[in-house]
Image (cartoon, grey):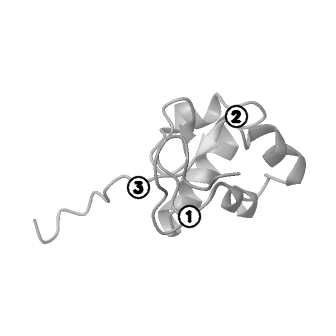
Amino acid sequence: MVAGSGRGAVAAGVAPTDPGRVNLNSASADELARLPGVGPAKAQAIIQRRNEEPFRKPEDLRRVKGIGEKLYDRLKDQITVGEPAPAPKGRGG
């Protein structure tokens, strides 16, 4: 295998955003809820978790209450992480 081949380099362990996947750090509640097995309640839990600390790797999703190993295995090929959406704080602008 050749590391770094394909879509480009990965910097500091953060995967580039994949347009075919749902970005856990920027997806809306509606987008998250459409993932198989997620629904509105888990989507809100994902958003609450990312507001506390952005996801650094897809595996971090397993830290969300209600998302275990089986559900993560179903989702791992449909999710990605990237730059989090800017916080709506309005400070230092």
Q: Residue at x 69, y 45 (%)?
A: 42
Q: Nearer the viewer, residue 15 or 39?
A: 15
Q: Give the class, few, some or many, for how many residues have Cα within 10 Å of label 2's Cα (few <14, many ≥20).
A: some
Q: Residue at x 67, y 62 (%)?
A: 60
Residue 39, position as x, y percentages in the image? 70, 34
Which of marks 1 and 3 precedes in the sequence? 1
Which of marks 3 and 2 precedes in the sequence? 2
Label 1 element class:
loop
For the residues labelled 1 and 2, the Cα–Cα distance comes to: 22 Å
Q: Residue at x 55, y 47 (%)?
A: 5
- Is the residue under label 1 in contact with that under label 3 (CB below 8 Å)? no
Q: Which residue is mark 1?
A: 56
- Is the residue under label 2 in contact with that under label 1 (CB below 8 Å)? no
Q: Residue at x 78, y 34 (%)?
A: 37
For the residues labelled 3 and 1, the Cα–Cα distance comes to: 9 Å
Residue 90, by quadrant, is bottom left
Give the mark toward the camera: 1 or 2: 1
The amino acid marked with disc number 1 is: Arg
Q: Is residue 37 left or right of residue 17?
A: right
Label 3 element class:
loop
Residue 36, by quadrant, is top right
- Residue 83, numbered label: 3
Q: Nearer the viewer, residue 58 or 13?
A: 13
Residue 14, position as x, y percentages in the image? 51, 61
- Extreme-front residue of the structure: 2
Q: Which residue is mark 2?
A: 39
Q: Give the class, few, some or many, for how many residues have Cα within 10 Å of label 3's Cα (few <14, many ≥20).
A: some
How many marks on residues?
3
For the residues labelled 2 and 3, the Cα–Cα distance comes to: 23 Å
